[in-house]
Amino acid sequence: MPSDTGFFNNYNYTLMIDRFLPVDGLNIHIRKTGVGKKAIVFIHGNSCSAEFWKNQMLDVVLEAHYQLVAIDLPGHGGSDKSVDYSISRLKDLLPAIVDALDLDSYVLAGLSYGTALIAEAAPKMTNCKGFFLASPNITNNDFPPTVYIIPFAELGTMIADHVPPDVLQKFATHLMISEANTELRDQFVKTYLDTDPKFRVDLGLTMQSAGWSDEFRNLIDTGLPVNYLFGEKDRALNIHYMDSIAFPDNHSVYKIPDAAHFVNIDQAAVFNKKLKDFCLIAFNDQG
């Protein structure tokens, strides 16, 4: 049976719950807080964890109006490892995980790789009301990863099983807005090392085989609102690759100043305000 325990107890204005959900033979770790029947479900990026959503999970306005649930993907954080991390496997697993949360309605918020997974799974996300996608990796044959990933010396780290410590440090620093942000760098290095290396290897195989669907079409065909957010100082992602796309009226692209790849951390207040505004639209709330 799933068990609940409190953590982040140093924050006296909220209570985090640490829980494990059995889904398709795996124990999936989630963190949750907040109230209400409406929820925001957070999906982290490659070699990250639910911890990367802490600035959103601890936002007093968000947690006062919505359930907030951050999921550790298989092979990440506290979740079990899997024998298969292919996109075809995970895009079926994600809806099953969210269904196990038993939510009335929800918005999906993703970061980096998490946005691609959300876009792959979008057609199967029942009760979803919208998609809020940060540092988006949305892919199709016209916009493959080679279009939106900016090459740099340590780029292969994202699909490597293991790399030397100095290479990992340089890779992490490249994702940061400032080399002085050692806390965020060290956090990423830790989660990278804790992640099942097979996840990154399988991601590389997906990229090599062009194993994606038309993720833009998946999102558009849902008819749901979508926000895409880029950090203007992202050195790993081409923040202009969507500029030529003719989106539906309910899709919006934003570029956030003074933010790099982890835009939700670099500019948490701006990010959270946009997320709140988006939820008012997605849930058709009046305020």
Image (cartoon, grey):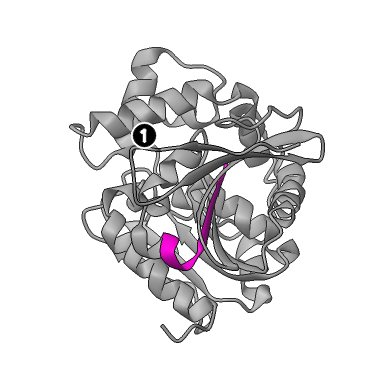
- Residue extending furthest toward the left: 180
Above or below residue 246? Residue 196 is above
From this viewpoint, is residue 140 visible?
no
Question: Quarter of the image containing the C terminus?
Answer: bottom left
Residue pictured at 69% horizontal, 27% vertical: 81
Question: Quarter of the image containing the N terminus?
Answer: top right
Residue pictured at 27% horizontal, 49% vertical: 266
Residue pictured at 71% horizontal, 38% vertical: 2
Residue pictured at 42% horizontal, 42% vertical: 52
- Residue extending furthest toward the right: 24
- Residue extending furthest toward the front: 12
Q: Position of residue 114 (x, y in %)?
A: 55, 49
Q: Position of residue 55 (x, y in %)?
A: 35, 49
Residue 207: quadrant of the picture = top right
Q: Position of residue 269 (x, y in %)?
A: 27, 59
| Figure disc tally | 1
Name the element at disc 1. loop
Q: Left of 246 or right of it: where is 84?
A: right
The crowd level at tag 1 (other Cα within 10 Å; few <14, some 14-19, many 20+) is: few
From this viewpoint, is residue 287 visible?
yes
Above or below residue 65? Residue 143 is above
Q: Left of 201 or right of it: where is 248?
A: left
Q: Is residue 273 magenta?
A: no
Q: Is residue 68 magenta?
A: yes
Residue 255: quadrant of the picture = bottom left
Residue with the mark numbered 1: 152
Q: Left of 99 or right of it: where is 219?
A: left
Q: Position of residue 25 (x, y in %)?
A: 81, 34
Which amino acid does the dot numbered 1 rest on?
A: Phe
Q: Which residues are magenta?
A: 63-72
Foreground pick, 101 / 35 = 35
